[in-house]
Image: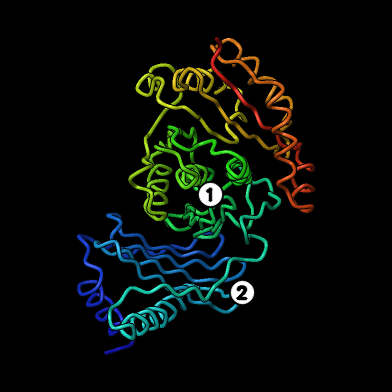
Amino acid sequence: MNNIDFTTITFILLVIIIVPTKSAALLCQQNQRRSFYSDARDGNIFFTLSSHKRSSIHYDFISRAKDKIQLFVKAENDLTLYDDHRRTFLSNILLQSINSVLSTAFYPLSVFAEEEPIECKNGAIISESAVPGAYQQLCMDLPERRFSLKSTGDQLYIYQGASLGDGMAGRTGVAVWNSGILLTRFLDSLSVESPLLRGKAVLELGCGAALASVASAKLGAESVIATDANPEVIRLAQRNIERNGIQTIAKTAELHWGLMDAAEYAAAADVVIGSDLTYNSGSWLALAETMSIILKPGGLVIYVTLGHSGFNTEGEVGGFLSTVASKDLRLLTKESIEWTVRLKTLLSPNEKIVIDANGGARVILLSKKL
């Protein structure tokens, strides 16, 4: 029996004994960034191989009992996985995985042999490069990013599109964007001085990977709804809610902006949060309508926007605010200016350079008109 046959049989036995699943599809594909992914659609088994700039390989086995076995195995830098090497490579890695699991006498384990690239550590904000129809940066290709909340000491673990497979690494809605990181830092900073979110109903619009929603739950919100219009994004957001153990506080919902869909959540939120939502002028009216309908009287919209190459933050914000004025919302001008100044104090010197080079950052605070 050759090596790959033995490995395949052993792996199947491992699946049956340790991580039972209704179906396990082992799908490998190669994209232009030399990444390989395999995904069992029911979520009981999850398996990812990612060869990015720093060449890490990430395994995440999730059993039905919600015990996790995570193996991070470091590969050689500049690893090239040509088709004729792929079977041998996978065979060797699977054998390492099986040996590691068996050596633990079947107890769940968490081994982190591969650190985040230094550029991405501590939730850093780094520069983006324009790609057709979107923007890209190194940290977006990681299967998972980690963040810390200073006010509570909590660690947040956020899966990105690379953890979903299907060539989704770096896609717009399934990556943690700089604006989401800054919104999360800002909410954390406010919570140091006062429990802004404690006991509140929070709803995030355009949640993406749901970093800010996860943070809101950890910062004391009574309930959190992470919403997005994309089912793929909602699947990732739900996974991050479960990853951080906040299922009793937070949930996801598919929400398309506009009067009809937002009516289901009328006056549902004390605080509406969002980041980087106004880059498309065609969505301003629907977004303003949605904010107005969802927000409770006396509630607050906290919105953070950052510039991108080719986009003018001031022009974008000005256009959106002119639309907001007609939708039962008012700008809290003084507070928005003060909070924008405060936002900039949360940036490192290098991060300030990155953000200033692309048009700066703004905090927009809105409330219901009296």
Q: Single out the mark in the foreground, 1 or 2.
A: 1
Query: Label 1 crowding class (10 Å Cα cut-off): few <14, some 14-19, many 20+?
Result: many
- Image check: 137 left or right of 65? right
At 62% across and 59% down in the image, what residue appears?
122
> Which dot marks residue 61?
none
Query: What is the number of the mark on residue 78?
Result: 2
Q: Amino acid at mark 2?
A: Asp
* Residue name at image x 48 percent, y 76 percent: 73
Query: Relative to 57, is 294 above or below?
Result: above
Q: Is residue 366 visible?
A: yes
> Foreground residue, 295 or 6?
295
Q: Position of residue 338 (x, y in %)?
A: 73, 30
The answer for how far apart the CA atoms under marks 1 and 2 are is 23 Å
Q: Is residue 353 left or right of residue 164?
A: right
Q: Which residue is mark 1?
A: 175
Question: Is 345 left, or right, of 72 in this rendering?
Answer: right
Q: Is residue 164 above or below residue 97?
A: above
Which of the image's four quarters has the C terminus?
A: top right
Question: Dot 2: what SS?
Answer: loop
Sequence order check, earlier mark of 1 and 2: 2
Q: Is residue 174 left or right of residue 189?
A: left
Q: Position of residue 147 (x, y in %)?
A: 56, 56
Q: Residues within 10 Å of mark 2 (few under 14, many from 20)?
A: few
Displayed quadrant of residue 244: bottom left
Q: Amino acid at mark 1?
A: Ala
Residues at circles 1 and 2 in contact by the CB criterion of under 8 Å: no
Vertical order, 184 against 369 (above or below): below
As rendered, which of 255 and 273 lies closer to the eye?
A: 273
Image quadrant occupied by the N terminus: bottom left
Q: Residue at the spot x=65%, y=15% of the render?
A: 322
